[in-house]
Protein backbone atom coordinates (compact mmCIF):
# COMPACT_ATOMS: atom_id res chain seq x y z
CA UNK A 1 0.00 0.00 0.00
CA UNK A 2 1.53 3.28 -1.16
CA UNK A 3 0.51 6.41 0.73
CA UNK A 4 0.31 9.55 -1.39
CA UNK A 5 -0.24 13.08 -0.12
CA UNK A 6 -1.57 15.49 -2.72
CA UNK A 7 -2.07 19.27 -2.43
CA UNK A 8 -5.30 20.48 -0.90
CA UNK A 9 -6.58 21.91 -4.18
CA UNK A 10 -6.11 18.57 -5.89
CA UNK A 11 -7.80 16.76 -2.98
CA UNK A 12 -10.79 19.01 -3.57
CA UNK A 13 -10.67 18.32 -7.28
CA UNK A 14 -10.43 14.55 -6.74
CA UNK A 15 -13.05 14.68 -3.97
CA UNK A 16 -10.80 12.94 -1.45
CA UNK A 17 -9.76 13.83 2.06
CA UNK A 18 -6.46 12.96 3.67
CA UNK A 19 -3.97 10.64 2.06
CA UNK A 20 -4.64 8.65 -1.08
CA UNK A 21 -3.74 4.96 -0.84
CA UNK A 22 -2.71 3.03 -3.91
CA UNK A 23 -2.01 -0.63 -4.54
CA UNK A 24 0.73 -1.10 -7.12
CA UNK A 25 1.32 -4.54 -8.57
CA UNK A 26 4.72 -3.83 -10.09
CA UNK A 27 7.83 -1.77 -9.39
CA UNK A 28 7.19 1.29 -7.27
CA UNK A 29 8.58 4.31 -9.08
CA UNK A 30 7.40 7.90 -9.36
CA UNK A 31 6.03 7.09 -12.78
CA UNK A 32 4.10 4.03 -11.62
CA UNK A 33 2.71 5.91 -8.62
CA UNK A 34 1.58 8.84 -10.75
CA UNK A 35 0.15 6.53 -13.42
CA UNK A 36 -1.88 4.71 -10.75
CA UNK A 37 -2.98 7.97 -9.17
CA UNK A 38 -4.23 9.34 -12.49
CA UNK A 39 -5.92 6.04 -13.31
CA UNK A 40 -7.83 6.12 -10.05
CA UNK A 41 -8.54 9.85 -10.25
CA UNK A 42 -8.68 10.81 -13.93
CA UNK A 43 -9.63 14.37 -13.09
CA UNK A 44 -6.02 14.82 -11.96
CA UNK A 45 -4.65 14.15 -15.43
CA UNK A 46 -2.78 17.22 -16.63
CA UNK A 47 -2.68 18.85 -13.21
CA UNK A 48 0.55 17.21 -12.01
CA UNK A 49 2.20 16.16 -15.27
CA UNK A 50 1.84 17.22 -18.87
CA UNK A 51 -0.78 15.16 -20.69
CA UNK A 52 1.57 14.08 -23.46
CA UNK A 53 5.18 14.34 -22.28
CA UNK A 54 4.39 13.26 -18.70
CA UNK A 55 6.89 15.86 -17.50
CA UNK A 56 6.29 17.39 -14.09
CA UNK A 57 4.50 20.72 -14.19
CA UNK A 58 6.90 23.53 -13.37
CA UNK A 59 5.44 24.39 -9.96
CA UNK A 60 4.92 20.85 -8.69
CA UNK A 61 7.45 19.13 -6.42
CA UNK A 62 7.84 15.48 -5.41
CA UNK A 63 9.19 14.70 -1.93
CA UNK A 64 9.75 11.50 0.06
CA UNK A 65 11.78 10.63 3.13
CA UNK A 66 12.98 14.22 3.48
CA UNK A 67 14.39 14.13 -0.07
CA UNK A 68 13.44 16.22 -3.09
CA UNK A 69 12.81 13.74 -5.89
CA UNK A 70 11.45 16.32 -8.33
CA UNK A 71 14.39 16.12 -10.67
CA UNK A 72 15.31 12.48 -10.32
CA UNK A 73 14.40 9.92 -12.95
CA UNK A 74 10.72 8.99 -12.83
CA UNK A 75 11.75 5.39 -13.29
CA UNK A 76 14.08 5.17 -10.28
CA UNK A 77 12.75 2.93 -7.50
CA UNK A 78 11.19 4.88 -4.64
CA UNK A 79 12.66 4.43 -1.14
CA UNK A 80 11.70 1.24 0.68
CA UNK A 81 9.92 3.28 3.35
CA UNK A 82 7.53 4.54 0.65
CA UNK A 83 7.14 1.09 -0.86
CA UNK A 84 6.18 -0.49 2.49
CA UNK A 85 3.93 2.41 3.46
CA UNK A 86 5.98 3.71 6.36
CA UNK A 87 6.49 7.06 4.67
CA UNK A 88 4.18 8.89 2.26
CA UNK A 89 5.04 10.10 -1.23
CA UNK A 90 4.35 13.80 -1.25
CA UNK A 91 3.11 15.80 -4.24
CA UNK A 92 3.54 19.43 -3.31
CA UNK A 93 2.76 22.80 -4.84
CA UNK A 94 5.98 24.81 -5.01
CA UNK A 95 6.33 27.78 -2.71
CA UNK A 96 5.18 31.06 -4.15
CA UNK A 97 4.67 34.57 -2.93
CA UNK A 98 6.69 36.98 -0.93
CA UNK B 1 -41.35 36.17 -12.93
CA UNK B 2 -38.02 36.51 -14.64
CA UNK B 3 -34.77 36.34 -12.74
CA UNK B 4 -31.12 36.87 -13.46
CA UNK B 5 -28.00 34.91 -12.65
CA UNK B 6 -24.64 36.65 -12.80
CA UNK B 7 -21.62 34.39 -13.26
CA UNK B 8 -18.49 36.00 -11.86
CA UNK B 9 -15.02 34.60 -12.42
CA UNK B 10 -12.34 35.95 -10.10
CA UNK B 11 -8.68 35.45 -9.36
CA UNK B 12 -9.54 33.21 -6.41
CA UNK B 13 -12.75 31.43 -7.28
CA UNK B 14 -16.18 31.63 -8.89
CA UNK B 15 -19.25 33.37 -7.56
CA UNK B 16 -22.85 33.03 -8.65
CA UNK B 17 -25.08 36.03 -7.94
CA UNK B 18 -28.83 35.60 -8.31
CA UNK B 19 -31.80 37.91 -8.04
CA UNK B 20 -35.38 38.19 -9.16
CA UNK B 21 -36.34 40.53 -11.97
CA UNK B 22 -36.26 43.55 -9.70
CA UNK B 23 -32.52 43.03 -9.24
CA UNK B 24 -32.47 44.74 -5.87
CA UNK B 25 -31.78 41.84 -3.48
CA UNK B 26 -29.01 39.43 -4.37
CA UNK B 27 -28.00 36.02 -3.18
CA UNK B 28 -24.26 35.42 -3.36
CA UNK B 29 -23.00 31.85 -3.76
CA UNK B 30 -19.31 31.06 -3.60
CA UNK B 31 -16.45 30.88 -3.74
CA UNK B 32 -16.67 27.84 -5.94
CA UNK B 33 -13.26 26.35 -6.78
CA UNK B 34 -11.75 28.47 -4.03
CA UNK B 35 -8.19 29.52 -4.64
CA UNK B 36 -8.27 28.91 -8.40
CA UNK B 37 -8.41 31.53 -11.12
CA UNK B 38 -11.75 31.34 -12.89
CA UNK B 39 -11.14 32.97 -16.22
CA UNK B 40 -14.66 32.60 -17.55
CA UNK B 41 -18.04 30.97 -17.00
CA UNK B 42 -20.87 30.91 -19.49
CA UNK B 43 -24.19 29.13 -19.75
CA UNK B 44 -25.78 27.49 -22.75
CA UNK B 45 -28.42 29.68 -24.43
CA UNK B 46 -30.60 26.61 -25.01
CA UNK B 47 -30.09 25.05 -21.57
CA UNK B 48 -29.24 27.86 -19.11
CA UNK B 49 -28.60 25.45 -16.26
CA UNK B 50 -25.72 24.03 -18.28
CA UNK B 51 -22.74 26.19 -17.37
CA UNK B 52 -19.12 25.77 -18.37
CA UNK B 53 -16.27 27.18 -16.29
CA UNK B 54 -12.58 27.62 -17.00
CA UNK B 55 -10.64 26.89 -13.80
CA UNK B 56 -6.91 27.50 -13.97
CA UNK B 57 -3.85 27.63 -11.77
CA UNK B 58 -0.20 28.41 -12.20
CA UNK B 59 0.54 25.25 -10.23
CA UNK B 60 -2.01 22.79 -11.55
CA UNK B 61 -2.87 24.03 -15.03
CA UNK B 62 -6.27 23.86 -16.67
CA UNK B 63 -9.45 22.26 -15.36
CA UNK B 64 -12.80 22.43 -17.12
CA UNK B 65 -15.90 22.35 -14.94
CA UNK B 66 -19.49 21.84 -15.99
CA UNK B 67 -22.66 22.38 -14.04
CA UNK B 68 -26.05 21.01 -15.04
CA UNK B 69 -28.01 22.69 -12.26
CA UNK B 70 -27.23 26.36 -12.67
CA UNK B 71 -23.98 26.36 -10.76
CA UNK B 72 -25.04 24.54 -7.60
CA UNK B 73 -22.95 21.45 -8.32
CA UNK B 74 -20.11 20.87 -10.74
CA UNK B 75 -18.37 18.01 -12.48
CA UNK B 76 -14.86 17.91 -13.90
CA UNK B 77 -14.70 17.57 -17.66
CA UNK B 78 -11.85 16.99 -20.12
CA UNK B 79 -8.84 19.28 -19.97
CA UNK B 80 -6.79 17.94 -22.84
CA UNK B 81 -6.27 20.75 -25.35
CA UNK B 82 -3.83 19.37 -27.91
CA UNK B 83 -3.06 21.40 -30.98
CA UNK B 84 -3.99 19.63 -34.20
CA UNK B 85 -1.19 18.12 -36.27
CA UNK B 86 2.19 19.79 -36.45
CA UNK B 87 2.13 22.43 -33.74
CA UNK B 88 4.06 24.97 -35.78
CA UNK B 89 5.51 28.26 -34.61
CA UNK B 90 4.41 31.76 -33.83
CA UNK B 91 6.73 34.65 -33.05
CA UNK B 92 7.93 35.06 -29.50
CA UNK B 93 8.92 38.25 -27.66
CA UNK B 94 12.45 37.92 -28.99
CA UNK B 95 11.18 37.85 -32.57
CA UNK B 96 12.15 34.22 -33.01
CA UNK B 97 9.83 31.35 -33.90
CA UNK B 98 8.37 29.53 -30.92
CA UNK B 99 6.08 26.49 -30.85
CA UNK B 100 2.51 27.00 -29.72
CA UNK B 101 2.05 25.89 -26.11
CA UNK B 102 -1.28 25.53 -24.33
CA UNK B 103 -1.59 27.67 -21.22
CA UNK B 104 -5.25 28.22 -20.33
CA UNK B 105 -8.79 28.70 -21.55
CA UNK B 106 -9.78 32.36 -21.63
CA UNK B 107 -13.31 32.09 -22.94
CA UNK B 108 -16.06 29.54 -23.47
CA UNK B 109 -18.75 30.24 -26.04
CA UNK B 110 -21.57 27.70 -25.91
CA UNK B 111 -23.39 26.93 -29.15
CA UNK B 112 -26.60 28.80 -29.84
CA UNK B 113 -28.40 25.53 -30.62
CA UNK B 114 -26.74 22.60 -28.85
CA UNK B 115 -25.83 22.49 -25.14
CA UNK B 116 -23.15 19.88 -25.78
CA UNK B 117 -21.30 22.02 -28.29
CA UNK B 118 -18.98 24.69 -26.95
CA UNK B 119 -16.13 26.70 -28.41
CA UNK B 120 -13.07 27.48 -26.30
CA UNK B 121 -10.63 30.31 -26.89
CA UNK B 122 -7.24 29.49 -25.49
CA UNK B 123 -3.75 30.84 -24.92
CA UNK B 124 -1.51 30.35 -26.92
CA UNK B 125 -4.16 31.54 -29.30
CA UNK B 126 -6.28 28.86 -30.91
CA UNK B 127 -9.92 27.85 -31.15
CA UNK B 128 -11.14 24.52 -29.81
CA UNK B 129 -14.55 22.87 -29.90
CA UNK B 130 -16.33 20.14 -28.00
CA UNK B 131 -19.43 18.37 -29.23
CA UNK B 132 -19.81 16.03 -26.26
CA UNK B 133 -20.40 18.49 -23.46
CA UNK B 134 -16.78 19.19 -22.63
CA UNK B 135 -15.31 15.71 -22.39
CA UNK B 136 -13.21 15.94 -25.53
CA UNK B 137 -11.82 19.02 -27.26
CA UNK B 138 -10.58 19.36 -30.82
CA UNK B 139 -8.88 22.29 -32.44
CA UNK B 140 -10.22 24.14 -35.47
CA UNK B 141 -6.68 24.43 -36.80
CA UNK B 142 -7.29 26.54 -39.90
CA UNK B 143 -7.44 29.66 -37.75
CA UNK B 144 -3.72 29.45 -37.07
CA UNK B 145 -3.16 29.31 -40.82
CA UNK B 146 -4.32 32.92 -41.01
CA UNK B 147 -0.75 34.17 -40.80
CA UNK B 148 -0.31 32.56 -37.40
CA UNK B 149 3.42 32.41 -37.98
CA UNK B 150 3.41 36.22 -37.58
CA UNK B 151 1.36 36.39 -34.39
CA UNK B 152 3.37 37.62 -31.44
CA UNK B 153 2.18 37.82 -27.84
CA UNK B 154 1.61 41.15 -26.17
CA UNK B 155 2.24 41.79 -22.50
CA UNK B 156 -1.00 40.05 -21.59
CA UNK B 157 -0.21 36.88 -23.47
CA UNK B 158 -1.39 35.62 -26.85
CA UNK B 159 -4.93 34.74 -25.96
CA UNK B 160 -8.06 34.09 -28.00
CA UNK B 161 -10.59 35.92 -25.86
CA UNK B 162 -13.58 36.71 -28.07
CA UNK B 163 -15.81 34.26 -29.92
CA UNK B 164 -18.98 35.56 -31.58
CA UNK B 165 -21.55 33.28 -33.17
CA UNK B 166 -23.99 34.50 -35.81
CA UNK B 167 -27.52 33.24 -35.24
CA UNK B 168 -28.45 33.86 -38.87
CA UNK B 169 -25.38 32.19 -40.37
CA UNK B 170 -24.38 29.11 -38.36
CA UNK B 171 -21.19 28.69 -40.37
CA UNK B 172 -19.94 32.17 -39.50
CA UNK B 173 -17.72 32.68 -36.44
CA UNK B 174 -15.74 35.72 -35.37
CA UNK B 175 -12.70 35.48 -33.12
CA UNK B 176 -10.37 38.07 -31.64
CA UNK B 177 -6.86 37.54 -30.35
CA UNK B 178 -4.71 39.87 -28.32
CA UNK B 179 -1.85 41.27 -30.38
CA UNK B 180 -2.92 39.23 -33.41
CA UNK B 181 -6.22 40.80 -34.48
CA UNK B 182 -9.70 39.76 -35.54
CA UNK B 183 -10.65 36.88 -37.79
CA UNK B 184 -13.78 35.50 -39.45
CA UNK B 185 -14.78 32.17 -40.91
CA UNK B 186 -17.82 31.74 -43.14
CA UNK B 187 -17.52 27.97 -43.42
CA UNK B 188 -17.56 26.67 -39.89
CA UNK B 189 -13.85 27.08 -39.33
CA UNK B 190 -12.47 25.45 -42.47
CA UNK B 191 -10.82 28.71 -43.46
CA UNK B 192 -10.38 32.09 -41.82
CA UNK B 193 -9.41 35.55 -42.90
CA UNK B 194 -8.15 38.53 -40.93
CA UNK B 195 -10.80 41.24 -40.70
CA UNK B 196 -8.68 44.24 -39.88
CA UNK B 197 -9.09 46.69 -42.75
CA UNK B 198 -9.38 50.13 -41.24
CA UNK B 199 -7.66 49.32 -37.97
CA UNK B 200 -4.66 51.51 -37.26
CA UNK B 201 -2.04 50.84 -34.60
CA UNK B 202 0.27 53.80 -34.96
CA UNK B 203 2.51 53.15 -31.99
CA UNK B 204 2.08 49.42 -31.54
CA UNK B 205 3.03 48.11 -34.99
CA UNK B 206 5.78 49.04 -37.44
CA UNK B 207 3.13 49.01 -40.18
CA UNK B 208 0.10 50.71 -38.60
CA UNK B 209 -2.19 49.13 -41.20
CA UNK B 210 -0.82 45.60 -40.98
CA UNK B 211 -3.21 42.75 -41.67
CA UNK B 212 -2.35 40.97 -38.41
CA UNK B 213 -0.85 42.16 -35.14
CA UNK B 214 -3.51 44.62 -33.96
CA UNK B 215 -4.28 44.26 -30.28
CA UNK B 216 -8.03 43.74 -30.28
CA UNK B 217 -9.37 43.79 -26.74
CA UNK B 218 -12.99 42.90 -27.34
CA UNK B 219 -15.67 42.73 -30.02
CA UNK B 220 -19.42 42.93 -29.36
CA UNK B 221 -22.44 42.32 -31.53
CA UNK B 222 -26.21 42.66 -31.14
CA UNK B 223 -27.85 39.37 -32.14
CA UNK B 224 -30.42 41.15 -34.31
CA UNK B 225 -27.72 42.80 -36.44
CA UNK B 226 -24.86 40.34 -36.74
CA UNK B 227 -23.10 42.32 -39.46
CA UNK B 228 -22.62 45.30 -37.17
CA UNK B 229 -19.63 44.85 -34.88
CA UNK B 230 -18.21 47.11 -32.20
CA UNK B 231 -14.59 46.77 -31.15
CA UNK B 232 -12.58 48.06 -28.23
CA UNK B 233 -9.05 47.98 -29.54
CA UNK B 234 -5.94 48.60 -27.45
CA UNK B 235 -6.47 52.22 -28.38
CA UNK B 236 -9.53 53.21 -30.46
CA UNK B 237 -13.16 52.19 -30.36
CA UNK B 238 -14.09 50.89 -33.79
CA UNK B 239 -17.22 49.95 -35.70
CA UNK B 240 -17.89 47.73 -38.69
CA UNK B 241 -21.13 47.63 -40.66
CA UNK B 242 -20.05 44.87 -43.01
CA UNK B 243 -19.22 41.93 -40.77
CA UNK B 244 -15.71 43.12 -40.14
CA UNK B 245 -14.67 43.62 -43.76
CA UNK B 246 -13.94 47.24 -42.92
CA UNK B 247 -13.76 49.29 -39.74
CA UNK B 248 -13.99 52.95 -38.87
CA UNK B 249 -13.24 54.73 -35.64
CA UNK B 250 -16.10 55.85 -33.39
CA UNK B 251 -14.10 57.01 -30.35
CA UNK B 252 -15.63 60.49 -30.72
CA UNK B 253 -15.63 62.47 -27.48
CA UNK B 254 -14.39 59.72 -25.16
CA UNK B 255 -11.89 61.03 -22.58
CA UNK B 256 -9.57 58.21 -23.65
CA UNK B 257 -10.25 55.47 -26.14
CA UNK B 258 -8.11 52.88 -24.38
CA UNK B 259 -10.07 50.21 -22.55
CA UNK B 260 -10.99 46.57 -22.45
CA UNK B 261 -14.72 45.66 -22.51
CA UNK B 262 -17.41 46.78 -24.92
CA UNK B 263 -21.01 45.64 -24.98
CA UNK B 264 -24.34 46.35 -26.65
CA UNK B 265 -27.71 47.13 -25.04
CA UNK B 266 -30.08 44.16 -25.14
CA UNK B 267 -32.88 45.97 -26.98
CA UNK B 268 -31.20 48.97 -28.63
CA UNK B 269 -28.61 47.82 -31.16
CA UNK B 270 -27.14 51.31 -31.46
CA UNK B 271 -26.60 51.71 -27.72
CA UNK B 272 -23.14 50.59 -26.68
CA UNK B 273 -21.01 50.75 -23.54
CA UNK B 274 -17.29 51.09 -22.85
CA UNK B 275 -15.20 51.81 -19.77
CA UNK B 276 -12.40 54.23 -20.70
CA UNK B 277 -9.06 53.50 -19.06
CA UNK B 278 -6.33 56.11 -18.85
CA UNK B 279 -3.64 54.41 -20.91
CA UNK B 280 -1.90 51.20 -21.80
CA UNK B 281 0.47 51.59 -18.87
CA UNK B 282 -2.00 53.18 -16.44
CA UNK B 283 -4.78 50.65 -16.21
CA UNK B 284 -7.26 52.71 -14.20
CA UNK B 285 -9.96 55.26 -14.96
CA UNK B 286 -8.84 58.79 -15.85
CA UNK B 287 -8.96 61.23 -12.93
CA UNK B 288 -9.74 58.38 -10.51
CA UNK B 289 -13.40 58.52 -11.64
CA UNK B 290 -15.02 55.24 -12.59
CA UNK B 291 -17.22 56.10 -15.56
CA UNK B 292 -19.04 53.88 -17.98
CA UNK B 293 -19.55 55.69 -21.26
CA UNK B 294 -22.68 55.07 -23.30
CA UNK B 295 -23.34 55.95 -26.88
CA UNK B 296 -26.91 55.79 -28.16
CA UNK B 297 -25.78 56.50 -31.68
CA UNK B 298 -23.54 53.51 -32.28
CA UNK B 299 -20.45 55.48 -31.38
CA UNK B 300 -18.91 58.94 -31.78
CA UNK B 301 -21.27 60.65 -29.32
CA UNK B 302 -20.69 59.41 -25.79
CA UNK B 303 -22.10 60.33 -22.39
CA UNK B 304 -20.54 59.49 -19.04
CA UNK B 305 -22.60 57.35 -16.65
CA UNK B 306 -21.53 58.08 -13.10
CA UNK B 307 -24.48 57.83 -10.72
CA UNK B 308 -23.60 55.28 -8.07
CA UNK B 309 -20.02 54.79 -9.28
CA UNK B 310 -17.02 56.11 -7.31
CA UNK B 311 -16.00 59.54 -8.60
CA UNK B 312 -12.81 60.00 -6.67
CA UNK B 313 -9.73 57.95 -5.83
CA UNK B 314 -10.82 54.97 -7.90
CA UNK B 315 -7.97 53.11 -9.55
CA UNK B 316 -9.43 49.78 -10.59
CA UNK B 317 -9.54 48.25 -14.03
CA UNK B 318 -12.36 46.48 -15.86
CA UNK B 319 -11.11 43.53 -17.86
CA UNK B 320 -12.25 42.54 -21.33
CA UNK B 321 -14.66 39.77 -20.35
CA UNK B 322 -16.00 41.55 -17.27
CA UNK B 323 -19.04 43.35 -18.71
CA UNK B 324 -22.41 41.91 -19.73
CA UNK B 325 -26.06 42.83 -20.17
CA UNK B 326 -29.26 41.05 -19.23
CA UNK B 327 -32.31 40.84 -21.47
CA UNK B 328 -35.02 42.07 -19.11
CA UNK B 329 -37.35 44.80 -20.41
CA UNK B 330 -35.36 47.43 -18.56
CA UNK B 331 -31.94 46.32 -19.70
CA UNK B 332 -29.49 45.52 -16.92
CA UNK B 333 -25.80 46.26 -17.39
CA UNK B 334 -23.16 44.64 -15.20
CA UNK B 335 -19.41 44.89 -14.82
CA UNK B 336 -16.74 43.69 -12.42
CA UNK B 337 -13.51 45.36 -11.41
CA UNK B 338 -10.02 44.27 -10.51
CA UNK B 339 -10.86 45.66 -7.05
CA UNK B 340 -13.52 43.01 -6.55
CA UNK B 341 -16.65 45.07 -7.03
CA UNK B 342 -19.49 43.94 -9.25
CA UNK B 343 -21.72 46.85 -10.24
CA UNK B 344 -25.19 46.54 -11.70
CA UNK B 345 -27.50 48.99 -13.40
CA UNK B 346 -31.14 48.08 -13.86
CA UNK B 347 -31.89 51.09 -16.05
CA UNK B 348 -29.54 50.77 -19.00
CA UNK B 349 -26.69 52.46 -17.15
CA UNK B 350 -28.40 55.58 -15.81
CA UNK B 351 -27.75 54.53 -12.20
CA UNK B 352 -25.47 51.94 -10.65
CA UNK B 353 -25.10 50.10 -7.39
CA UNK B 354 -22.70 47.42 -6.24
CA UNK B 355 -23.99 43.87 -5.89
CA UNK B 356 -20.80 42.91 -4.05
CA UNK B 357 -17.84 45.06 -3.08
CA UNK B 358 -15.07 42.83 -1.85
CA UNK B 359 -14.58 39.83 -4.08
CA UNK B 360 -11.15 38.87 -5.36
CA UNK B 361 -10.20 40.70 -8.56
CA UNK B 362 -12.88 40.07 -11.17
CA UNK B 363 -11.78 38.41 -14.39
CA UNK B 364 -15.13 37.86 -16.06
CA UNK B 365 -18.84 38.61 -15.77
CA UNK B 366 -21.64 36.90 -17.67
CA UNK B 367 -25.36 37.31 -17.14
CA UNK B 368 -28.17 34.87 -17.72
CA UNK B 369 -31.74 36.06 -18.00
CA UNK B 370 -33.95 33.25 -16.76
CA UNK B 371 -37.64 32.77 -17.44
Image (cartoon, rainbow, N blue to C red):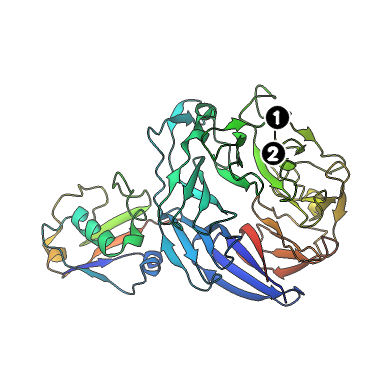
Quarter of the image with the N terminus of chain B is bottom right
Q: Residues within 10 Å of mark 1 (few under 14, many from 20)?
A: some
| Percent coordinates x, y for residue B68 in the rendering | 50, 69
Whether residue B309 is visible to the viewer of this picture, yes or no, is yes
Q: Could you say which is closer to the camera, residue B342 or residue B22?
A: B22
User: Is residue B61 shown left or right of residue B368?
Assistant: left
The answer to which image quadrant residue B360 occupies is bottom right
Is there any visible trace of residue A67 in the rendered image? no
Quadrant in the picture for residue B198 = top right
Residue at numbered disc 1:
B201
Q: Are marks 2 and 1 in contact (CB under 8 Å)?
A: yes
Percent position of residue A19, x then y: 28, 71
| Closer to us: B24 or B330 | B330
Instruction: Give the letter of the chain under mark 1.
Output: B
Residue that appears at 71% across and 73% down: B2
Left or right: where B171 falls relative to A83: right
Q: Earlier in the sequence, mark 2 or mark 1?
A: 1
Is B104 drawn above or below residue B155 in the view shown? below
> Residue B122 in the image: x percent, y percent?
51, 45
Q: Quadrant of the C terminus of chain B?
A: bottom right
In the foreground, B135 or A3: B135
Chain letter, disc 2 residue:
B
- The image shows residue B73 at horizontal and vertical percentages of 49, 72
Residue B234: mark: 2
Marks 2 and 1, how far apart in space?
8 Å
Q: Secondary structure at mark 2?
A: loop
Q: What's the residue at 64%, 44% (across, down)? A: B169
Residues beneath discs 2 and 1 located on the same chain: yes
Q: Residues within 10 Å of mark 2 (few under 14, many from 20)?
A: many
Q: Residue at x 69, y 74 (%)?
A: B19
Amino acid sequence: MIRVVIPVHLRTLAKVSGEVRLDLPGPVTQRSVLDALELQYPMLEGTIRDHVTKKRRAFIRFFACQEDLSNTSPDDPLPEAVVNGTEPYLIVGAMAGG
Amino acid sequence: MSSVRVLVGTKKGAFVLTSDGKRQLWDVSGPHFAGWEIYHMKGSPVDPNRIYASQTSGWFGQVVQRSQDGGQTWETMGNKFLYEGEVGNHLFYDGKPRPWEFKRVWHFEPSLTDPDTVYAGIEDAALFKTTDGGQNWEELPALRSAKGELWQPGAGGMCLHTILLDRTRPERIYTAISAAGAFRTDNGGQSWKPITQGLKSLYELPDPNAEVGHCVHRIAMHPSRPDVLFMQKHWDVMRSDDAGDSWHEVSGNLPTDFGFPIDVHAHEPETIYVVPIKSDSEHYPPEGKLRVYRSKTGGNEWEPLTKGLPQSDCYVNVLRDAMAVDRLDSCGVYFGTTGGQVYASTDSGDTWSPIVRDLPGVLSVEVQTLA
